[in-house]
Amino acid sequence: MFIIQMVSWLLKCLSINNLFLSHFYFIIQFIILSFFYITILTEEYQKKIVKIGLALGLSALGIQYAINKDAFYSFNLFEIFITSFLLIIYATLYFYNLLNEKRKFYYINMGILIYLFGSTVLFLAGNLVATLVSKTNRITWILNAFLYIVYQLFVWIEWQKNFSHKKPEEAL
């Protein structure tokens, strides 16, 4: 995320379109969080759902980009929907498991859901918002940044509750 943010800022300063970097963000986020859910889900059938979702999602995106190379230079609504929707399904599966288990990664999962629900709506409206006046456009991205900060706060709370007050060997 940091690398994408820095490259995006640099391209903006050079007045070069940096929209294509969003695709790397969505796909890398999708891959990393899919592996996160494969790791924390306890039921084998749920892990299989995530693995199949990951393979199908990446395949569908690969096919779409092969067929429509112009999608790389605009907000790809299909990419945003498929990656976020699958991650929301994985997070919901994890919450289902928490009904009978200890609440490990509860706050991280909550942060992921809040961020994904909010940012998905914002990004899906991205093509429309880009045509509006820049003041309205800025509000949308400020709201998305706020959602990302909320997500990071949930990660921090999880870390504080489960890992910060333990010896390193106890945190594992």
Image (cartoon, grey):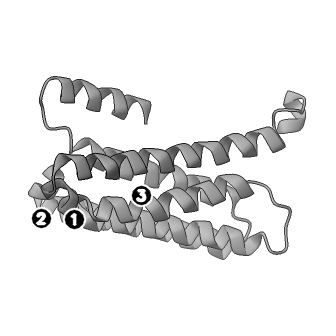
Q: Residue 59: x and y, percent?
A: 32, 64
The residue depicted at 81 percent of the width and 37 percent of the height is: 163
Proximity of marks 3 and 1: CB atoms separated by less than 8 Å? no
Are the two marked residues, 2 and 1, in contact with CB atoms closer than 8 angstroms?
yes
State the separation of the CA atoms marked 3 and 1.
Answer: 25 Å
Amino acid under label 1?
A: Ile
Position in image of residue 39 (x %, y %):
66, 55
Frontmost of labels 2 and 3 is: 3
Residue 80: mark in rendering: none
**Number of other residues with Cα within 10 Å of mark 1, as a class: few under 14, some 14 to 19, many 20 or more:** few
At horizontal 26% and vertical 65% (from top left) the residue drawn is 77
Task: Give residue 124's position: percent from left, percent from top.
Answer: 30, 65
The residue at the point 61 percent across, 54 percent down is: 111
The residue tagged with tag 1: helix, strand or loop?
helix
The amino acid type found where label 3 is placed reads: Ser
Camera sees residue 82: yes
Per the image, the residue denoted by label 1 is 63
C-alpha span from label 2 to label 1:
6 Å
Q: Nearer the viewer, residue 104 or 156?
A: 156
| 151 shown above or below 11 | below
| Whether residue 82 is situated above or below residue 163 in the rendered picture | below
| Front one among 121 and 16 | 121
Residue of label 2: 67
Asked whether the residues under the numbered discs 2 and 3 touch, taking CB atoms below 8 Å apart as contact, a structural biologist would say no
Q: CA distance from mark 2 to mark 3?
A: 27 Å
Sequence-wise, the earlier of marks 3 and 1 is 1
* Quarter of the figure that contains the N terminus: top left
Front-most of residues 53 and 156: 156
Residue identified by numbered label 3: 119
